[in-house]
Each structure stands twice: as C-alpha cells, then as structure tokens.
Image: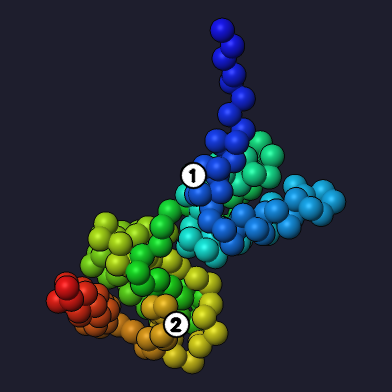
C-alpha cells in the first residue's frame, strides 16, 4: 500500500484560487526573472492593490507560489507600514496630525472621531463603513484642521462638525443599500 504525502498540485491550485489570475500571472512573471524572491515586495503590493489588504490566506498563497518561507512573507508584510493586514472600511478617514492642523485642534477632532466611531487609529468600524487613520500632512495647512474621507478634503473641521460629516457618508451607504435591496 503506497500513500503519497506530496500534494504540491493541490497546494498550488488552492494558492492560485486564493490570489486570482492577475496576481498569479504577476508572480509567474516574477519567477521567470533572476532572483524572484527579490520581487516579494512588488508581489505584496500587487496583492494589496487587488484585494485592499493582505489576508493570512494571501500571504500563505504568495509563500507557496514564490517558494519563500511563510515566516519571511509574513515578516515583510508586517514590517512595512504600507501593508494592511486587515480589511479597510468602505470610507477611509485620514485626519491630519501635522503641526498646523494639530495647533488648530486636530487632536480634538481626532478624539471626536474616535468617540463617534468607537475605534482608534488604524481600526475599522464593526460595520465595515469607516477606517480611521492619522497622517502627518495632507498639504493643505492653510485649511487646518483638515481631514480627508477618501479623496474629499474637509477643511477647518471642528469637533461639532464630525457627526454631521459622518452622517453624510452613512446616508450614502444607506442609499446604496436601499437601491440594491429594491432590485429583484
């Protein structure tokens, strides 16, 4: 009786399914180059661009297809601040904590955001609507304090304005939900 423990085809098929065709083709092109392991950062960028973050399954699949130890892949992903290991919310809120914004009250705006959303910097609300991040400078110091939600700049924000601003985005989510629930 012969039993085989070599399940490379199954592992490879699962990894390809997890990553999808675009990422798999990119990995294959990297593997065709000399020193493919030097392309790990580029591969992780590609995965994050495709999925918005690096799930554990993504990291394992990259390790398998690139034949790089999983610990090294996870280490690179967790070392660089750019990589997200958790899904991001529907809306990304960046509150500027640079000098001009901070002096004009960004810390109070940030605290109000945290109180309203029930999260801290780097976290996403449980409903998946908002992710809160701090940034050093948005480049609009004359409009301080500033926060960006996705690509929209909100200038001269006060803590009292935070609930009103958030409500506008929640309304978008509600409208989108009612539009899709009304379809058959």
Residue 59 visible in the snapshot: no
Count of labels in the image: 2
Q: Residue at x 56, y 48 (%)?
A: 16
How far is the residue under mark 1 from the one under mark 2? 30 Å
Instruction: Give the residue number, with chain letter if any, for mark 1.
Output: 57
Q: Give the answer, above or below, for where 65 lies relative to 127.
A: above
Towards the viewer: 43 or 155: 43
Helix, strand or loop at disc 2? Answer: loop
- Image coordinates for residue 10, horizontal then vertical, percent: 55, 35
Image quarter where the N terminus lies is: top right
- Image coordinates for residue 108, horizontal then vertical, percent: 33, 72
Residue 24 visible in the snapshot: yes
Left of 90 or right of it: where is 83? Answer: right
- Image coordinates for residue 54, horizontal then vertical, percent: 51, 53
Residue found at the far top of this picture: 1
Q: Residues within 10 Å of mark 2 (few under 14, many from 20)?
A: few
Q: Mark 2 or mark 1, which is nearer the start of the sequence?
A: 1
Q: How is the image coloured?
A: rainbow
Q: Residue at x 69, y 40 (%)?
A: 68
Left of 36 or right of it: where is 45? Answer: left
Q: Residues within 10 Å of mark 1 (few under 14, many from 20)?
A: few
Helix, strand or loop at disc 1? Answer: helix
Which quadrant holds residue 166? bottom left
Q: Are marks 1 and 2 in contact (CB under 8 Å)?
A: no
Towards the viewer: 132 or 27: 27
Residue found at the far right of this picture: 34
Q: Residue at x 79, y 53 (%)?
A: 32
Left of 116 or right of it: where is 74? Answer: right
Which quadrant holds residue 160? bottom left
Foreground mark, 1 or 2?
1
Identify the disc placed on residue 151: 2
């Amino acid at each position: 009786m012969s039993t085989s423990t070599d399940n490379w085809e199954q592992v490879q098929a699962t990894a390809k399914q997890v990553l999808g065709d675009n990422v798999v083709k990119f990995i294959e092109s990297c593997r065709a180059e000399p020193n493919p392991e030097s392309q790990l950062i580029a591969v992780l960028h590609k995965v994050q661009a495709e999925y918005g973050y690096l799930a554990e399954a993504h990291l394992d699949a990259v390790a398998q297809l690139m034949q790089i130890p999983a610990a090294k892949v996870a280490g690179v992903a967790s070392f660089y601040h750019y990589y997200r290991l958790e899904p991001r919310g529907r809306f990304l809120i960046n509150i500027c904590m640079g000098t001009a914004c901070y002096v004009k009250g960004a810390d109070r705006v940030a605290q109000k955001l945290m109180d309203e959303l029930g999260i801290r910097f780097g976290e996403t609300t449980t409903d998946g609507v908002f992710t809160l991040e701090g940034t050093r400078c948005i480049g609009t110091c004359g409009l301080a304090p500033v926060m960006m939600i996705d690509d929209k700049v909100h200038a001269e924000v006060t803590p009292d304005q935070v609930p009103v601003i958030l409500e506008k985005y929640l309304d978008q989510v509600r409208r989108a939900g009612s539009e899709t629930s009304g379809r058959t």
